[in-house]
Image (tube, rainbow, N blue to C red):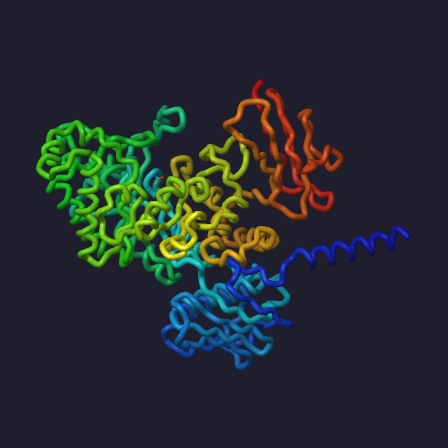
Amino acid sequence: MKRFFLTLSALLVVAFAALSAPRYDIVPTPKKLTEAPGDFLLSKTVRLVVEDPAFAEVAADFKAQVTLATGFGLQGSGNAIRLVRREGFGKEAYRMRVAPEGVVIEATEVNGAFYALQTLLQLFPAEIYSPVRAKKVRKWAAPCCIIEDEPEFWYRGFLFDSGRFFFPKEEILKFLDLMAMYKQNMFHWHLTEDQGWRIQIDKYPRLTEVGAWRKETAWHSGIGNGIPHGGFYTKDDIREVVEYARKRCITVIPEVEIPGHSTAAIAAYPELGCFPDRHYEVETRWGIWKNLYAPTATTFTFLEDVFTELFELFPSPIYHIGGDEAPKDAYRESRYCQDLMKVLGIDREEELQTFFVKRMGDFLRKHGKTVIGWDEILDGGRLEDPIAMSYRGHAPAARGIRRGIRVVLTPNRWCYLDNKQEDQADNVAQEIFMPLKKVYNYYPAVDSLPDLSKKYIIGYETCLWTEYVPDNATAEYQAYPRNVAAAEVGWTARPNKDWESFRRRMPKILKTLDLKNIGYCPVYHDVIFDYDRRLDFPKPMNLQLDNPEGEVHYTLDGSEPTIRSPRYDGKPFVVDKGSVIKARGFVAGKPIGKTVTKTFAK
Ligand code: ACM
């Protein structure tokens, strides 16, 4: 009897697992997938057929990955994976038929072919991403289907802030790799800051001799740690990054901040600032600083020279000129700026920024570049056909699209990956609570303006600001897995987005991230304490687990939660000062992740 019971429960587990593991766990969800029975099997007889040389490069990279993981050379004489160039598809669109006797991929442009190959990789077991031969996989099967796919938004971005901390080139390449796998296509590289200038410019060597280094870093307390920090990318580094991105259909958009966030450049060349006689140092503290480039001939020549060198490095048709957080104290105080305002016939310092930005915008336009800037660039209203990044919520986006200006949405509460995703005593991330589900459920639109949103909102971008992200490990922890959810936000049409479906795909996503050696935040396994941090006591508290099969057990007496501890019933409960809550997720009676402890001071 006992034996029978065991067998039955084993069967139930198998059935449950089969139910919970989706047959097609593609991320981002394609526009249209028609299921079909059977599998396409990789073997040593399979061959890769590329009929158009335009697709040869992406095909070679696909083949290299497949060969690495499976040992199959894709040069057999049997079933084929065939890449066919056919007119009529959008730039990033493709159609793919996976059948037992072969795979046919059709696309017009290389981007579409590349994305089809990313989708095909995902149809195989996650070990297809293995960096070494995956010997344990018995059967390299891709489930049969027909996929017709194209993205919802053409701008699917990710910002990386190399200004606050310098990150080695290798880490940037790692991020690009992940972006490409999940079909993000715009790498917005924040390269200049008050705390560091990160790019070699031949004509101005002090930018990297002086501007790339600070004497220490001051954290929350404002007290420096005494440890010098710095670094910069050489032109060869940049070329390597841009080429690596190009091969993965990613555009690298450089950002040079004007007129604010410019202390590092002014420390290197004080004549660029409003008070050339003052001494400036590369900033060691975070925040918004008052040093601005002065709108002088010297500064314009400098910036034009810098951009001219960047044109050689970044073929991107879009250039980011910052524009955010530039308090006008220096413009008010500077005699030169006040005189210039009289000459220009303007009476508000804000308009001096407009003049500045317009001047640089015209220069970039003359060189065939579209200017993108933070939402402050909407304030002046004189730039020709810019793109605005709405980061202070949705109001700037609404203003922009009402005026027929293209907008990328980056509202900080949904898009800033330095926000918290869980509660960890040792985590110094920003206070806003932004768990995986919140990132996933975001849709980039101004809800009250659906038609204008459709027309002018061109996409969405997540931003990894790095004030509290000092190293590679923290960068990966903050960015992943949330940036995978973000990739689906940018690609997948609204009716096809489904949090429950995404959660079911999480195990394979995490396995893939493991294989790519990404130190992601294991939120999926840990309990999240969800409460309003602005409220004083008593605090209503929710406990969440990003795992559909899991349940939460918790204790209030400091003991380790077990399966016999109270089970959280999903309803908010109230905690008082002095409470210590320990909570842990359990799946099928077994603990998962780690115990998370939340202590509230008396
Ligand atoms: C920003 O968060 N200042 C763009």
Figure disc tally: 0
Q: Is residue 344 left or right of residue 429?
A: left
Closer-to-camera residue (558/497) = 497
Write the residue at 69% across / 28% down.
559
> Splitting the image into four quadrants, where does ligand 1 fall?
top left
Q: Residue furthest top?
A: 602
Whether residue 538 appears in this view of the structure is yes
Q: Residue furthest bottom?
A: 77
User: Which quadrant of the view contains residue 286?
Assistant: top left
Q: Position of residue 380 (x, y in %)?
A: 24, 43
User: Which quadrant of the view contains residue 314?
Assistant: bottom left
Write the residue at 59% across / 63% down.
24
On screen, residue 337 above or below 48: above
On screen, residue 206 above or below 219: below
Q: Position of residue 327 (x, y in %)?
A: 26, 32
Write the residue at 61% across / 20% down.
578
Write the residue at 56% across / 32% down.
531
Closer-to-camera residue (373/382) = 382
On screen, residue 476 above or below 7: above
Whether residue 130 appears in this view of the structure is no
Q: Is residue 317 left or right of residue 506?
A: left
User: Which quadrant of the view contains residue 165?
Assistant: top left
